[in-house]
Amino acid sequence: MQSSQLTHRILYHAMLDMRAHARESGDNVTFQLCDLLHPVLLHLSEAALGEASYEQVWLDLQSRAAKRGDWAKWLQHQLAELQQEPS
């Protein structure tokens, strides 16, 4: 397994642990955010190997956010914030 895959998988498992902890503690916002983002880490691993495109990863994230109501707004807000940061 390549170092990029290892990194993505460790982050994926960390996100799953965070999601489980958030559920147990009743932290709904953190749970939903982890639930939205954890699959992205596996998709990034595929993109790093050339098995998927980063554009597809982005489109999948947008689709997942749109299915979760306010998370689409959150994602658009984050995008706007990132576009204002200096390169």
Image (cartoon, helix red, strand yellow):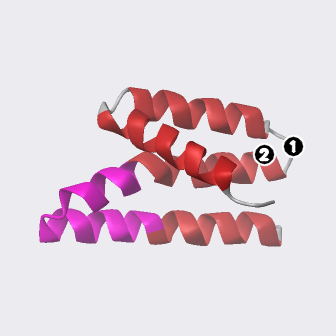
For mark 2, does the 10 Å Cα neighbourhood hold few (<14), some (14 to 19), or many (20 or more) residues?
some
Report the magenta residues as a range. Answer: 15-35
Q: Quadrant of the C terminus?
A: bottom right
Q: Amino acid at mark 1?
A: Gly
Q: Is residue 72 left or right of residue 30?
A: right
Q: Judging from the image, what secondary structure is the residue with disc 1 in?
A: loop
Residue that appears at 70% across and 70% down:
6
In the displayed structure, 18 sits above or below 33; it is: below
Circles 2 and 1, Cβ within 8 Å, touching? The answer is yes
Residue that appears at 37% across and 53% down:
33
- Location of residue 63 in the rendering, given as x and y in whole percent from the top left corner: 50, 27
In the displayed structure, 21 sits above or below 49; it is: below
- Number of marks: 2
- Location of residue 7 in the rendering, given as x and y in whole percent from the top left corner: 69, 71
On the image, which quarter does residue 23 sit in? bottom left
Residue that appears at 80% across and 72% down:
3
* Prevailing secondary structure of the magenta residues: helix
For label 1, the residue is 50
For label 2, the residue is 47
Q: Nearer the viewer, residue 75 or 2?
A: 75
In the displayed structure, 45 sits above or below 2; it is: above
Q: Amino acid at mark 2?
A: Ala
